[in-house]
Image (cartoon, helix red, strand yellow):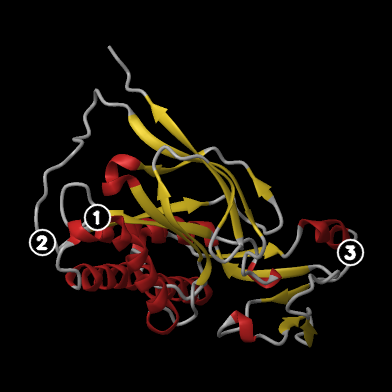
């Protein structure tokens, strides 16, 4: 009974730390560090038990693991161990799914509209959707040590609302993108162009870490966006040049202000245009390479 109660209390504390609703469910899980360890464990090799150290993962020097007797073993941060290791960790996909839902809810309530402009395109049921599809993506470094499991990558699409002088910040999950040095071909719609003015956006790729508070993150995104928009007296004169400025301000704010254990910046793609085909296109940091193709989706005609 005490164990169940302690587990519930710990899970509730984790939900609060992450800025997630109480109905998110259990956030903890125990997994083998690698599928390659399964055979050795099944054949009787004694496993170790480990969890990610506290603090910035770029500063970790070793991983503490424990055997069945409670003795400590020190493992490399960079090299996957050969002995079976069970990792006690957050259910990263569940956490990210819930966190992105929280962020989308907050970001959908823009509260700093200034001047209304005439819409060029009103989206209707009769109009085709203009989109860009992520045909291929590859990361050179996913910013994740082995103890943290597969990467949890998401994209912040930054642009300007087509009908109001407000930023649009869309969050897109890339749940399949688990490992670096691997080609993925998701055929995923990444950008809905009717949402943006000037037919231009930036893409900011991030990898979530355990201490991210999604509610705080989304509120901070809105605050930075508000400050950038308020600093520009004539948005129309600036044109789409405002979008990289918005993205850069978000990037500058990240390390010191947003996180207790920073979400890792992965890469950024500046000024992507509608109806343009990007083949094997590298981000500004040359860490991510994407193939992004335009796709028009026609409405159903009854």
Measure how far apart labels 2 and 1 are at the Cα level: 16 Å
Measure how far apart labels 2 and 3 are at the Cα level: 66 Å
Q: Earlier in the sequence, mark 3 or mark 1?
A: 3
Which residue is under mark 3?
Answer: 44
User: Are circles 2 and 3 on residues that touch, CB within 8 Å?
Assistant: no
Callout in the foreground (2, 3):
2
Q: Earlier in the sequence, mark 2 or mark 3?
A: 3
Answer with the quarter of the image where residue 86 lies: bottom right
Residue 137 is at least partly visible in this image? yes
Q: Secondary structure at mark 2?
A: loop
Which residue is under mark 2?
Answer: 114
Answer with the quarter of the image where residue 271 lies: bottom left
Q: Position of residue 299 (x, y in %)?
A: 32, 22
Q: Residue at the spot x=70%, y=69% of the render?
A: 146
Which residue is under mark 1?
Answer: 108
Q: Position of residue 284 (x, y in %)?
A: 53, 63
Q: Position of residue 231 (x, y in %)?
A: 20, 73
């Amino acid at each position: 009974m005490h164990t169940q109660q302690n587990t519930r209390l710990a899970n509730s504390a984790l939900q609060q730390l992450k800025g997630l609703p109480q109905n998110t469910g259990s956030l903890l899980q125990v997994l083998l560090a690698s599928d390659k360890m399964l055979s050795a464990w099944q054949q009787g090799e004694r496993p170790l038990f480990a969890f990610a150290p506290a603090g910035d993962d770029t500063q970790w020097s070793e991983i503490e693991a424990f055997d069945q007797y409670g003795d400590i073993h020190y493992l490399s941060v960079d090299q996957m161990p050969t002995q079976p290791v069970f990792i006690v960790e957050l259910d990263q996909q569940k956490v990210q799914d819930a966190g992105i839902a929280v962020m989308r809810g907050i970001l959908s309530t823009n509260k700093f509209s200034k001047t209304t402009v005439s819409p060029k395109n009103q989206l209707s049921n009769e109009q085709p959707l203009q989109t860009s599809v992520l045909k291929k993506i590859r990361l050179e470094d996913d910013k994740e040590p082995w103890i943290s499991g597969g990467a949890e990558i998401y994209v912040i699409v930054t642009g300007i609302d087509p009908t109001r002088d407000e930023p649009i910040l869309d969050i897109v999950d890339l749940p399949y993108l688990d490992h670096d040095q691997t080609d993925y071909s998701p055929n995923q719609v990444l950008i809905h162009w009717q949402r943006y003015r000037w037919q231009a956006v930036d893409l900011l790729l991030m990898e979530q870490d355990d201490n991210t508070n999604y509610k705080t993150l989304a509120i901070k995104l809105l605050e930075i966006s508000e400050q950038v928009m308020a600093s520009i007296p004539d948005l129309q004169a600036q044109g789409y040049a405002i979008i990289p400025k918005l993205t850069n301000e978000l990037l500058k704010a990240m390390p010191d202000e947003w996180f207790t254990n920073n979400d890792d910046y992965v890469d950024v793609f500046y000024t992507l245009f509608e109806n343009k085909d990007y083949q094997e296109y590298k981000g500004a940091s040359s860490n991510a390479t994407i193939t992004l193709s335009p796709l028009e989706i026609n409405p159903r005609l009854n």
